[in-house]
Image (spheres, helix red, strand yellow):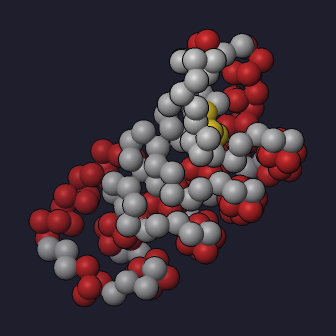
């Protein structure tokens, strides 16, 4: 995906930049500023840009949305703002990760709750949020998602696969 891509309105027109380096330096600087604001929880700054028309599903070179970065770094107020402005909680990055699975992995309870209330699909992504909750024995997340451990049917082999997958994706 291109830097400065809105995953919800991506265009195939010949006027769209085909690679990040074809963007003007000012656009790259703005993108870096926005992704850093999401990463650091600069909610007021992001609010100004979103109100001015920056797309809420903006993605970086790795397919991370502003919401993914805010969630992964534990910024619940920024997550709330992005959801209110229309960010899609189910956009996967280029590695197949979802914002809610990242928040489960990091143990950010408030962020997990906000994403869940915001419509995040706990079965989306690899590993998904349910698999991460099982792996890290986060029974409170499974309860939040309405899932009972006995309903999962995960054997020892599946849990081992999940462990290996999580280690590869998040390290």
Q: Is residue 95 above or below residue 2?
A: below
Q: Is residue 93 above or below residue 75?
A: above
Which residue corresponds to the image point at 67% horizontal and 37% vertical from the top-left?
35
Q: Is residue 114 above or below residue 24?
A: below
Q: Quadrant of residue 143?
A: bottom left
Compared across the picture, whether 72 is left or right of 37 comes to: left
Location of residue 103 in the rendering, given as x and y in whole percent from the top left corner: 52, 60
Which residue corresponds to the image point at 72% horizontal and 13% vertical from the top-left?
24
Q: Quadrant of residue 29?
A: top right
Compared across the picture, whether 19 is left or right of 138 comes to: right
In the rendered image, the quadrant that contains the C terminus is: top left
Location of residue 38 in the rendering, given as x and y in whole percent from the top left corner: 69, 45
Location of residue 160 in the rendering, given as x and y in whole percent from the top left corner: 18, 61
Which residue corresponds to the image point at 57% horizontal and 42% vertical from the top-left?
7
Q: Quadrant of residue 28?
A: top right
Which residue corresponds to the image point at 12% horizontal and 65% vertical from the top-left?
157
Q: Is residue 37 visible?
A: yes
Q: Nearer the viewer, residue 16 or 59?
A: 16
Q: Is residue 116 above or below residue 59?
A: below
Q: Is residue 69 visible?
A: no
Compared across the picture, whether 155 is left or right of 64 comes to: left
Location of residue 104 in the rendering, given as x and y in whole percent from the top left corner: 47, 64
Q: How many numbered marks are there?
A: 0
Q: Nearer the viewer, residue 78 or 136?
A: 78
């Amino acid at each position: 995906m291109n830097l400065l891509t809105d995953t919800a309105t991506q265009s195939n027109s010949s006027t769209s930049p085909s690679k990040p380096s074809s963007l003007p330096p000012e656009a790259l600087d703005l993108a870096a500023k926005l992704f850093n604001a999401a990463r650091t929880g600069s909610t007021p700054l992001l609010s100004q840009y979103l109100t001015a028309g920056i797309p809420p599903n903006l993605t970086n070179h790795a397919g991370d949305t502003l919401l993914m970065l805010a969630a992964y770094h534990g910024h619940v107020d920024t997550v709330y703002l992005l959801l209110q402005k229309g960010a899609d909680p189910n956009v996967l990055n280029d590695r197949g990760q979802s914002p809610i699975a990242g928040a489960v992995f990091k143990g950010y309870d408030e962020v997990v709750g906000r994403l869940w209330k915001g419509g995040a699909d706990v079965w989306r992504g690899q590993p998904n949020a349910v698999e991460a909750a099982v792996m890290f024995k986060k029974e409170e997340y499974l309860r939040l998602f309405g899932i009972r451990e006995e309903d999962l049917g995960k054997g020892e082999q599946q849990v081992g696969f999940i462990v290996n997958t999580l280690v590869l994706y998040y390290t």
